[in-house]
Amino acid sequence: MSEPQIVTIPCLSDNYAFLLHDPASGETACIDVPDHAPIVAELDARGWTLGHILITHHHWDHVQGVDALKAAKGGKVYGCGADAARLPALDVSLAEGDTFTIGNHTVEILDVSGHCDNHLAFIVPGANAAFTADSLMALGCGRLFEGTPDQMWASLSKLAALPPETVIYSGHEYTTSNARFAHTIEPDNPALISRIQSVAAAREADQPTVPSTLAEELATNPFLRADDPVVSANVGLPGAPAAAVFAEIRRRKDNF
Ligand code: ZN
Ligand code: FE
């Protein structure tokens, strides 16, 4: 089975869309559509046909180009059936535990709500990939617009249980400010200190900091580290449950 190719497409001011292409079958999926034009251009430049449009969640900066992309390039629209009322028209309704295939590769659905209700992540084990949008982000996580801290901690815990070599394709280039915040939680974490340096170098060179690996996030992302005794002590909650530590870290970030 050949490895799929994954292309990162910057959209709007700081969003990312992704193309996942299976060379064996020629099938291509687009994950989120912040803006259709750069995605159409990338498909045309590569000569790829679009079969699947995957939506992570209802926010406008992830869906506003869906209808225009479908009109231009075709493709079936996949999204959370429970959220159909506020998503573009769906061809395939999904819920946690569902699977479908892109070429020979299985896509698994996780519900990773917290940022908003009915936020899906698309896991492609054959590509070592997780498309997490505004749930788990590089050195961060999405703000809790609809969900509770307990719910987001449960969602992040599902992602944390994936193989550590999983590559995390998240939805925004927020990593520079996430890094500044992370340093306030764990100023003495050597893995974090070195990641902050590589993030700064990448941004100076105008390179994206997305994707990252789950292993990097487990070592440096304060939101994934709420179950670490050093982190709970650093936020003044030694021995507290991880979800409570997570809630305190999220509260601090909201006021950062
Ligand atoms: Zn969002
Ligand atoms: Fe977003």
Image (cartoon, rainbow, N blue to C red):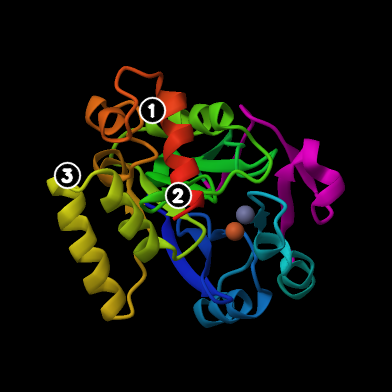
Q: Amino acid at mark 3?
A: Asn
Q: Which residue is mark 3?
A: 189
Q: Earlier in the sequence, mark 3 or mark 1?
A: 1
Q: Nearer the viewer, mark 3 or mark 1?
A: 3
Q: Secondary structure at mark 2?
A: helix
Residue 32, located in which quarter of the rendered image? bottom right
What x and y, as percent, mark residue 240?
A: 37, 19
- Range of the magenta residues? 74-103
Left/right placement of residue 176 relative to residue 68 reads: left
Residue count near mark 2 (Cα–Cα under 10 Å), binned few <14, some 14–19, many ≥20: some
The reply to whether residue 105 is visible in this rendering is no
Residue count near mark 1 (Cα–Cα under 10 Å), binned few <14, some 14–19, many ≥20: few
Q: Amino acid at mark 2?
A: Lys
| Quadrant location of the C terminus in the rendered image | bottom left
What x and y, as percent, mark residue 34?
A: 64, 68
Question: Which label belongs to residue 253?
Answer: 2
